[in-house]
Image (tube, rainbow, N blue to C red):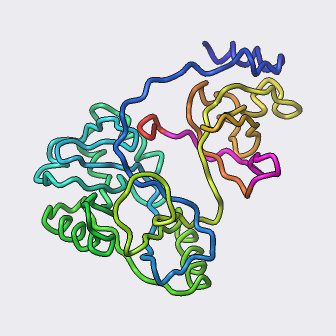
Amino acid sequence: MQRRDLLSRFSLGCLGCLTAAPSSASEAPALWLASPYQGHENLSDYWVSEKYDGIRGYWNGQQLLSRSGKVLTPPAWFVQAWPSTPFEGELWAGLGQFEQTAAIIQQKQASDSEWRALRFMVFDVSAHGKTFTERMALYQGLAKHIDQPWVHAVAQNKTHSHAALKTLLQTTVQAGGEGLMLHRGNSLYQSGRNGDVLKVKLHEDAEATVVGYEAGQGKYAQRMGALWVETPQGLRFKLGTGLSDAQRQNPPALGQWVTYRYRGLTDKGVPRFASFVRIRPAVER
């Protein structure tokens, strides 16, 4: 459907007639997923590291996969000498360069110069029967053994005060970082979401799919006013802030995943003050 056809439907307020077609998904690796930091945890149990705003990558010993299981296509030199040991990290182009990272990853044959802009920030190995503190030594040794300038072991540190953690978070964000991660030192590797791995951010964020559009009014007349999105749990709501003029003129396509930022939930479970952040790349799903 052409963009002008979409715009012509905005005046109808037509959510029901603009629904996303289902997309096929490949089998995803069984990775851990972070839960939100609550502020009452015993921080002496956790290691603290920076949260890198990139694309998660999982090396299964033979191929580099996205979180969703999509096979990524780095040049042969990028993964040369990588071991058969599975490990994971973040493909990262630097502070504030998420879009650049995503653009490179989504290409089937990105140039060598583009891939040389990326680093692989190693943060875990899926070794069974070992705690995270033990796995830290493993992934740090693994990165050292690979000995490639684009492969880095993520630094881990300790903090015992929530006030100190908050200060570190503010310093990290002011420098352009996304946030922090907490890993419980005595936790074994397990897939799914639990309190052993936490993300610490100034704002909560989540993902939803675009399922419709609402017409703009006033200065947004003849352009999109808001996105209708749907969460993985089936909740639908509007995203009307955070969108640029260019994005209102050419909105994210139906079925695309977007990231939004919010501050808590209403009594009905709807995100408060939800604001569009960006389109999530296909490799994330």
Residue at the far left in the pictured view: 81
Quadrant housing residue 246: top right
Quadrant housing residue 253: top right
Between 265 and 214, which is closer to the camera in this rendering? 265
Q: Is residue 59 left or right of residue 248?
A: left
Q: Residue at x 15, y 42 (%)?
A: 76
Q: Can you give x and y, in whole percent of width and height, for residue 252 in the image?
A: 61, 30
Q: Residue at x 15, y 64 (%)?
A: 147
Q: Is residue 151 left or right of residue 232?
A: left
Q: Residue at x 34, y 65 (%)?
A: 188
Between 43 and 143, which is closer to the camera in this rendering? 43
The span picked out in magenta is 265-280
Q: Can you give x and y, in whole percent of width and height, for residue 234 in the image?
A: 66, 34
Q: Residue at x 27, y 32 (%)?
A: 109
Q: Can you give x and y, in whole percent of width and height, for residue 204 in the image?
A: 64, 57
In the rendered view, would you say 111 is above or below 39? Answer: above
In the rendered view, would you say 63 is above or below 133? Answer: above
Q: Is residue 266 left or right of residue 248?
A: right
Query: How many tags in the picture?
Result: 0
In the rendered view, would you say 175 is above or below 148? Answer: below
Residue at the far right in the pictured view: 218
In the rendered view, would you say 233 is above or below 143? Answer: above
Between 270 and 96, which is closer to the camera in this rendering? 270
Q: Is residue 106 left or right of residue 120?
A: right
124 falls in the magenta region:
no
Between 73 and 221, which is closer to the camera in this rendering? 73
Q: Can you give x and y, in whole percent of width and height, for residue 1 in the image?
A: 60, 12
Judged by its main secondary structure, the magenta piece is loop
275 falls in the magenta region:
yes
